[in-house]
Image: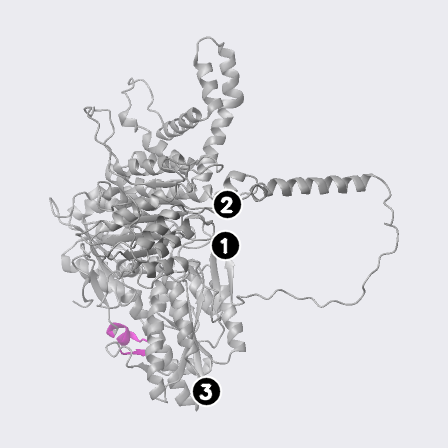
Amino acid sequence: MSIPALAHAIDFVEALDSWVTRPSHDREPPVIVLWDGETGPAHAEAFVSGYGGRLTENHDGPYLAPRAVVGPQPPPDGGAAGPDLDPPRPDVEFLELLVTDWKNTMPRRTGSLRAPMFQVCLDVLGIRPAGAEPAEPATRVPRDPHRVTAQALWTAWEQRTPVLGTVGQALGSASLPRWAAGIWTFALSWPLRAVHRWSLNRRMRWYARRVTSAGLAARDFVQAATRLRTADPEQQRLLRMNLLTEALFRDLSRAVAPSWFRPWRRRRAWPFVLLVPDLTGPRSSAVGQFLQVHRELAAQGLRPPLLIVAGRRGEPTGPALGLQQAAAVLRRPENPPADSPGPGTVTVRIEDGPEQPDVARHLRLKAKATPHEVGAFRAYAGWWAASALALVVLCSAGFAFGGHVPGMDSAQDTDDRPHAARPAQDPCPGTRSVGKEIVGVDTETQGCYFTVVEDSLLHDLQDRVREQNAAVHGAHRTVVFLAPLTADPRARSEQLVPAGVLQLQGAAAAQKTWNEQAIVNQDKPMLRILVANTGFAFGQGRPVARQIRELAAKDDTVSAVIGITQSRQESVDAINDLGDGMPVIGASVTGDFMATEARNFFHTQPTNERMAEVMARRATDRGSRKALIVYDREDRYSQELRDDLVARLRVGRVSVEDPWFAQVPAPRPGHGSATALGLPDLADRICALHKEHGTIFYVARGSQLPKVLAQVQSACGGDGTSGSSPVPVISSDVNTLIDYKPVPEWAELYKYPAVDLYYVSFSDKPVLHSPEGGSDHATGADSFRAAAAAITRAIAQSGGSASPSNVLQALRNRVVVRDGIAPDRPFTLPLGQKERRDRPIFLCLAPHDPGRDSHAHCQPGDR
């Protein structure tokens, strides 16, 4: 097929060429989906197929960029499937097809494509489980599955290594003496095996983390591979596409990474190209899984050098661009469309029209893309630099040992004039990098983001708050939103968007409404927000708090701190470092100890004691006589909520089973890297308790809940409709997982129909998969509303001053929060016993089918 000669086709093709023929080291290639109508010419399919021809100099090569074309599936093998044959795996076959195509289409002088991580993952899938091996005599001790895995991986690598494979075959023959085989084994084979296993565990650390996140606890790669092979087939199926795709993406990124001493790598000035002429074709299922995993990994920051161009028939589900508009977007990748359906996705609608003769002529005359050429000097730059450096070293050594050098004894001209030091200007003085996180206070008007992912919600929120701050003129006050705004940098959590980000969204929405009302109501002061990130789990809370204290000493408009979002000992320490007179108003903070141990802290939501009352009522209403509580004994919030819950259950004559702790990756910084142990035993206990009509409570951090539910789904089995009713699990801290995506596909809570998940919410209007609305959005707005009301009250009482001490005094003297931002959520600070009971609290049931039901079902906690 050839590219259709439609209007603006030249612009679009040249924009595509600009991606294919330029280096992709610092760019994220997009996913381009071409749509055309259900009837009429298949322009999208022709466009994708025709573009593949632009990447070859002739019909069968050589190639200008590595490309893989997804065509029809091969005819099935006519042989009968034997009992020892593995079931078909179309997803694995699809990825193997891509790798084979890319290997066969590597351009000249760019070397061959190596995919070591992908190959190791294939080796893992090829290892037969222990149950599939021939039965051993009863007198033999069963083989350790970890040793079996390590041996199989070593054998596969040995066979792929020419020298080792040849030596192994020679030693296996009967012609060589046994002493030669012994020398090889002791002197080389065993050390090489140890180094090979160490190297695998080091290079594949991400693999162990992914398998652990799926609920299969693993200490290293070999253990993770063993756990995966012994898992149930459904869990293997869900994981293998993710693991294989991530391994492939890491291999592709390494393949085009700059290298000083590998000229073939320096010549790889292109991305890999995937062409899918028809997304609804025979391989649509595998392609769909691949694109879904691509989106999830891109959202987590893994962006491979892969340009995807796909076509399909039908109407786009959202807004689409024309060819000319799409060409403009591709030439300006830093400004993607605001309504793009995914990270780096460009949706194009090809309108039918007559063939343009001049377009057809241009495409015939310029039928090939012009690749970016890397000359020999640049390709061997590392070798030239190394040679020059070696020459300099040799010359220096000659001068050093060659004796006296004329002129060295002569007096040197010196300049004794003092020189003023000129420190480099820090473009982001308020923020700094700590490990993989960016923390501090955002005091800038552009740049200096807390995340490097440009299409993230946090990135957009910083821009939104800055824009709203810029609209504030004249006399104003400032509040600081202090919270953990970045997810776990070690990827130990399935919660990719922290609750603090959604609460910041609620505070920003409240700021916009407040300032609009302040324009017409002169009694209300205009308010600015400064965003401060403490890092994951308040890991940098104390340094950032001291930074805020120094900022408040210089900026007399700072009146209060809001947010916090988490009840932790680290939160208490950070609040106490803010200083004696700074009022702090929490958003979703519920820990009872926060108000007693953190100076000048005020709750805006019901505390743990009230939550425990609501959760315990559900067990008594069900008539349960037994309960099991999953909690984190290393987390003070979880421990306190568990104690409150035990006290309430005992009042209702519900006996609490021996407390179980699912030891999941520790959220507290500096406490090592715990692994998910005990989950199978915990799931078995939950299933047994459910048969006795017991109730299960989950009061650990919500980011770890998917691991528990996945294990319960596997242990209790079924779909929740046949044989037994769903297992009721009552949780406290999962609002972010319910109300907003992204989370990994397997971690979406509605994928566990064997569980009825109830959770505590502070809003009865949760909107699934949307940052607008939901419990976190409401609590973030409440913290801003409380600060705004206290500042207004302080100004009225003190004759115009809203210093932190005046605002603190106003809060202690009672502040009524009633405004036009959320007229249905009035409250009074500080929260007394009566006020805590009057604050809205709901028990919600997460839906099993969000495609049909976009809202959770909530009822007041008192019912």
Residue 344 in sight here: no
Q: CA distance from mark 3 to mark 1?
A: 40 Å
Please tell me which residue lies in front, 377 or 764: 377
Residue 454, percent across and down? 41, 60
Q: Mark 2 is on which residue type? A: Glu
Q: Helix, strand, or loop for circle 2?
A: loop
Asked if 554 appears above or below 156 in the picture, the reply is below
Residue drawn at 33 percent across, 54 percent down: 359
Q: CA distance from mark 3 to mark 2?
A: 66 Å
The quadrant in which residue 238 appears is top left
Asked if 525 appears above or below 576 in the picture, the reply is below
Q: Quadrant of the C terminus?
A: bottom left
Q: How many marks?
A: 3
Labels 3 and 1: the sequence-earlier one: 1
Query: Crowdedness of circle 2 by 10 Å Cα count: few (<14), some, many (20+)?
Result: few
Q: Mark 3 is on which residue type? A: Ser
Q: Helix, strand, or loop for circle 1?
A: loop
**Nearer the viewer's eye, disc 3 or disc 2?**
2
- Residue 635 relative to residue 352: left or right: right
Residue 841 in sight here: yes
Q: Mark 1 is on which residue type? A: Gly
Residue 827, percent across and down? 28, 78
Residue under label 1, please give it.
435
Residue 760 on the magenta span: no
Residue under label 3, please give it.
801
The quadrant in which residue 471 appears is bottom left
Asked if 853 appears above or below 142 in the picture, the reply is below
Residue 324, percent across and down? 33, 60
Labels 1 and 2: the sequence-earlier one: 2
Residue under label 2, please give it.
373
Residue range (magenta): 826-838
